Image (spheres, helix red, strand yellow):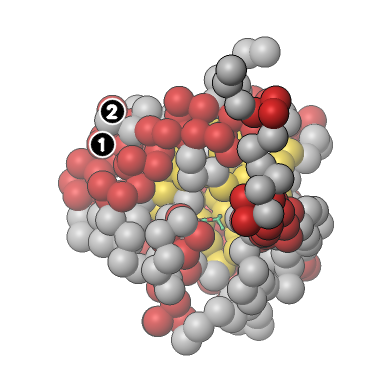
Amino acid sequence: PKRVRIHHLQQWKDAGERWPMLTAYDFPTAKVFDAAGIPVLLVGDSAANNVLGYDSTVPVSVDELLMLCKAVVRGASRSLIVADLPFGSYQVSPGQALETAVRFMKEGGAAAVKLEGGAHYAPQIRALVDAGIPVMAHLGFTPQSEHALGGFRVQGRGAGADKLLSDALAVQEAGAFATVLEMVPADVAKKVTGELRIPTVGIGAGPDCDAQVLVWPDMAGLNTGRVPRFVKRYADLAGALGGAAEQFSREVREGVYPAEEHSFR
Ligand code: KIV
Ligand code: NA
């Protein structure tokens, strides 16, 4: 099957076809999601929590995410790979953003990058787009700003709705090919989606976005910690994997494994 490109995402919006996106952080999951037909994989900085054990996305480095990005790229033959720019790697200036994004494209093999922020980051988005780097924006609740936003809270309520719409229009105007809308009221996300020409990718943003994204260890039940209420669990991987480890452990202790067929003569 042919490689998904950013113009396909625009075609799907124009045709009213919804599409799914998942995070991926390594080779085996990228292969599985690619084969499952997930058109867009995000090497999210949520790897900070979900792979590296940090308690927020703030500490993860460019080098840490680059290594994961390369592995995902090796695993995917059809999916479009979007790499998150981590906190501190683009906020300083458009030049800094371009240097970081170039690394994700050139060393990481990504097809696009994502950064958090609205109108204030339009110069960064413009600099990347002018250099030939497709940019996905991320509005609403932006985890890298957790401390400024006062924790995990719904954004875009009340007067915040106008700000969200103007940020969305600003990132579109700056050249972003899509924007994530995270934890915003469903009616606000619906309005933004209707006003924008480019696709919106919702997470905790109701059913009317053009696309939906979830953090894969949340949706597959590998994350055993607290998950946000917008997450739907499609599997119990922690249960399945824990069960496999317990059975292996039991069988080794009892001398059941390895059996005849696992042994060389
Ligand atoms: O890092 C991430 O997983 C994300 C998605 C939630 C959009 O940015
Ligand atoms: Na992210």
Residue shown at the point (58%, 21%) measured from the top left: 264
**Crowding at mark 1 (Cα within 10 Å: few <14, some 14-19, many 20+):** some
Residue shown at the point (46%, 56%) measured from the top left: 51
Residue 103 image label: 1
Residue shown at the point (66%, 42%) measured from the top left: 257
Q: Quadrant of the C terminus?
A: top right
> Residue 97 location in percent, x, y?
26, 48
- Picture layout, residue 61 above or below residue 80: below
Report the residue marked by disc 2. Answer: 106
Q: Secondary structure at mark 1?
A: helix
> Residue 69 location in percent, x, y?
40, 38
Choose between 188 and 265: the one closer to the eye. Answer: 265
- Kindly indicate the quadrant of the structure image that contains residue 113: top left
Q: Mark 1: which amino acid?
A: Arg
> Residue 52 location in percent, x, y?
40, 59
Q: CA distance from mark 2 to mark 1?
A: 5 Å
Tags 2 and 1 touching, CB below 8 Å: yes
Choose between 162 and 38: the one closer to the eye. Answer: 38
Q: Secondary structure at mark 2?
A: helix
**Crowding at mark 2 (Cα within 10 Å: few <14, some 14-19, many 20+):** few
Q: Quadrant of the N terminus?
A: top right
> Residue 191 location in percent, x, y?
73, 60
- Kindly indicate the quadrant of the structure image that contains residue 21: top right
